[in-house]
Image: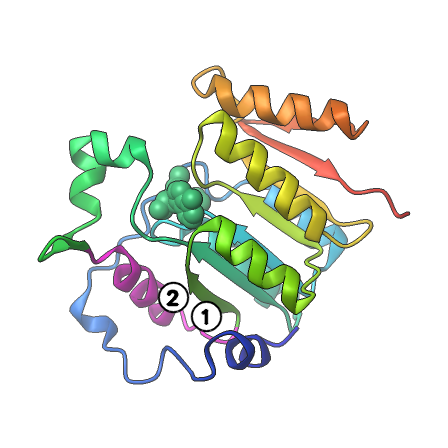
Amino acid sequence: MLANELMTKLHGTDIYAGFDASLYPDDTQGWNSEHPLLMEAIRVIRPSLVIEVGVWKGASTIFMAEQLRAAGLESSVLAVDTFLGSITHLTRPESRASLAPRHGWPQLYYLFLANVIRRKLENYIVPFPQTSDTAFQLMQQMGLRPQLVHIDAAHDYESVARDLANYYSLLAPGGALVGDDFTTHWPEVVWAATEFAKRHQLNLQQLSGKFLLQKPNV
Ligand SMILES: C[S@@+](CC[C@H](N)C(=O)[O-])C[C@H]1O[C@@H](n2cnc3c(N)ncnc32)[C@H](O)[C@@H]1O
């Protein structure tokens, strides 16, 4: 799906227009963002629509968009995040500082936009600043069917279980869902992902902290 079509559907306007990226530092700090499972999923599936839930400064969003561009695909990454941080970011001083609050409101979203513009990826990335729940409801109503989903938002059991159920339901047959932080450091992610895979009788592949679930081809 072309990013400008999706941009019009979601925002009704080009949200990048007139934005001055030079006001923000070039900072794409992330966690496990340039991951081989994301690269391999894009190489094999050649998705026309990718949805990422949990964007932060955009490191993994940008990585996937760069893979799409390198493969010559006219596809888009729909980037969903509140850009307000998770509980862990609010309780760690260094992550809290990254939110860069201005009059109390985090500037993380603008840092992300600047990172996208600097890499000339506006034709691949459509930002959607929203909670994962509300974004899901809208995407469901719009009938969006991504072929690849990357889940990396809140890491507590309830949130992960809900994001997995919601976004797996949107996934097109044959598509893949990749999730982050399948490690002993995040036991609730492991719990939710393992339980979800079992309930749906899916093979859970793991590689260096991420997991992958493939939706059967009906
Ligand atoms: C671990 S970071 C994402 C990192 C990013 N994928 C990367 O590789 O750099 C988690 C993000 O999830 C977002 N988040 C947490 N809970 C959310 C929710 N309920 N809805 C939308 N975004 C959420 C936070 O704002 C934060 O930016």
Name the residue at 75% across, 51% down.
44
- Camera-side residue of 107 and 40: 107
Q: Amino acid at mark 1?
A: Leu
Q: Quadrant of ligand 1?
A: top left
Residue 66 in view of the camera: no
Which badge, 2 or 1, comes first in the chain's sequence?
2
CB atoms of marks 2 and 1 within 8 Å: yes
Name the residue at 30% across, 60% down.
109
Quarter of the image holding residue 199?
Answer: top right
Q: Amino acid at mark 2?
A: Val
- Camera-side residue of 28 and 170: 170
Q: Position of residue 156 (x, y in %)?
A: 45, 27
89 relative position to 82: left or right:
left
Name the residue at 52% across, 82% down.
8
Q: Main secondary structure of the magenta part?
A: helix
Q: Residues within 10 Å of mark 2 (few under 14, many from 20)?
A: many
Q: Tag on residue 121?
A: 1
Q: Position of residue 206 (x, y in %)?
A: 64, 26
Name the residue at 20% across, 60% down.
25
105 relative position to 7: left or right:
left
Q: Position of residue 179 (x, y in %)?
A: 57, 37
What SS does tag 2 mark?
helix
Q: Position of residue 65 (x, y in %)?
A: 53, 61
Which residue is under mark 2?
116
Give the residues in magenta.
106-123
85 relative position to 129: left or right:
left
* Rendered position, 49 above or below 154: below
> How far apart are the two marked residues, 2 and 1, measured between alpha carbons?
5 Å
